[in-house]
Amino acid sequence: MTLETPSRWRSVLPHLAEPLPPDVTPPRASGDVKINIPVELIRHSVSTREYWDIPAPVVERYRQYRPTPLWRARGFEEAVDARVPIYVKNEGGNISGSHKLNTALAQAHYYKAAGVEELVTGTGAGQWGTALAAACALFGLRCRVFMVDSSLQRKPYRGVLMRMLGAELHSSPSGLTKVAAKEDLAAGNSLSLAIGEAVEYAADNDGVAFCIGSGETYSILHQSVIGLEAAEQLAALDAPVGTVIGCVGAGSNFGGIALPFHAAARTAGTEGPRLVAAESSSTPKLTRGVYAYDKTDATGSGPMEAMYTIGSDYQIPDAHTAGLRFHGAAKVISAMRHSGDIDAMAVSQADALDAGRLLARHESVLPAPESGHALAAAARIAASPDARQGVLVCVSGHGYLDLAAYEHFLDGGVEDQSPSDEALAHAVSGLATVAVRT
């Protein structure tokens, strides 16, 4: 069987237990930021249409690296004492090194059609910044990236790759924006701040648009190619799975691998596999956060969204898994967590890196530390006495530019910093929980 590159995206919105809570726009003051998004991307976010044709120029680029491989990881199974098969879907084989290129290409296409000349973004681990730089180069757009400084220091070659692709790169806090000058925010050195800097830069410059690659509903739609392919690949192997797992920063990787299975089950009237979001124990929004309205970035100028959050002002501990260091989960992921349609599991940094080591040793694939969280969750579930069917896990990206993290782990220097209950309670104490559906 020859698997074709998907020509349509599949939306989960028609299959939610109830409509998404509306965003709340704060009162505008002079100088507030307004984010302009192409109409087609807005439609992707609000329409209950299930299938969307992928534009031909985007499909053409997808064909350069899709479909991505899926295989039964027998060596990894043996290493973790799995009782059921573990199937791995690897998204790390493109120039960005991750799944992020799936939405970067789509967004570059739509922004180009809307007349935008430059895209600007914030990035944590650097996969999204690299993906956007690559997409902008292919679609003839300028690109500017604000990257979390602590992450850039750990993986400087991410920055080199972005610059090779033509992007202007700034470490965040950069000193170029008003939001970075705020002492309390700059100390956080977080993805929320990098995004805030990008939002401010876009607002202050003509022909520039802010672009985000994870938490937005349209980003999750574009990632559905992962799960759509995986379902076909598993069917070709006659390999049913009882659990689907992806790591979660804001949620696009998990959404991409898992939500097409939810949509298919709802359409067929069947139960479907268990969907498990694997998050960092240092940023435990889905396992220990609250479902409330919160800011999506450090500026607080955009709409407040209903999300599982540990508080946008919470000072997230520094970690090697920068791509998961975001305070909240996407509103689609959050709504499904609240309705009970998805489960969540917190994984320590050490366990994630150990799972990555095992995959490299037994499957010859080096995953990103972020992906290690999903692999560790897969190992736990597959080795459980309750395991009955196979487990599908998504490797969101490769770890070749994360070797410093693995070196730190191998040398015994990794420490996990799970927040205390008191710290989390303080961080969310001012949030409005009126959005919570009961």
Image: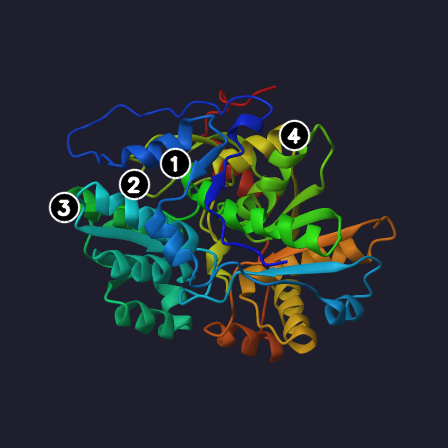
Q: Residues within 10 Å of mark 3 (few under 14, many from 20)?
A: few
Q: Amino acid at mark 3?
A: Gly
Residue underneath mark 4 = 266
Q: Amino acid at mark 4?
A: Arg
Q: Given this view, does label 4 or label 2 mark the residue nearer the observer? A: 4
Q: Are marks 4 and 2 in contact (CB under 8 Å)?
A: no
Q: Is residue 253 above or below residue 92?
A: above
Q: Residues within 10 Å of mark 2 (few under 14, many from 20)?
A: many
In what element is the residue under mark 1? loop
The label shown at residue 207 is: 3
Residue underneath mark 2 = 299
Q: Position of residue 132 (x, y in %)?
A: 33, 57
At x 53% / y 54%, what residue is drawn? 4
- Relative placement, left or right, of 144 versus 303 is left
The quadrant of the rendering that contains the N terminus is: bottom right
Q: Are marks 3 and 2 in contact (CB under 8 Å)?
A: no
Residue underneath mark 1 = 295
Q: CA distance from mark 3 to mark 2?
A: 21 Å
The label shown at residue 176 is: none
Colour mapping: rainbow
Q: CA distance from mark 1 to mark 2?
A: 8 Å
Which is more N-terminal, label 4 or label 1?
A: 4
Q: Position of residue 88 (x, y in %)?
A: 65, 61
Q: Residue at the right extreme?
A: 385
At x 61% / y 19%, what residue is drawn? 438
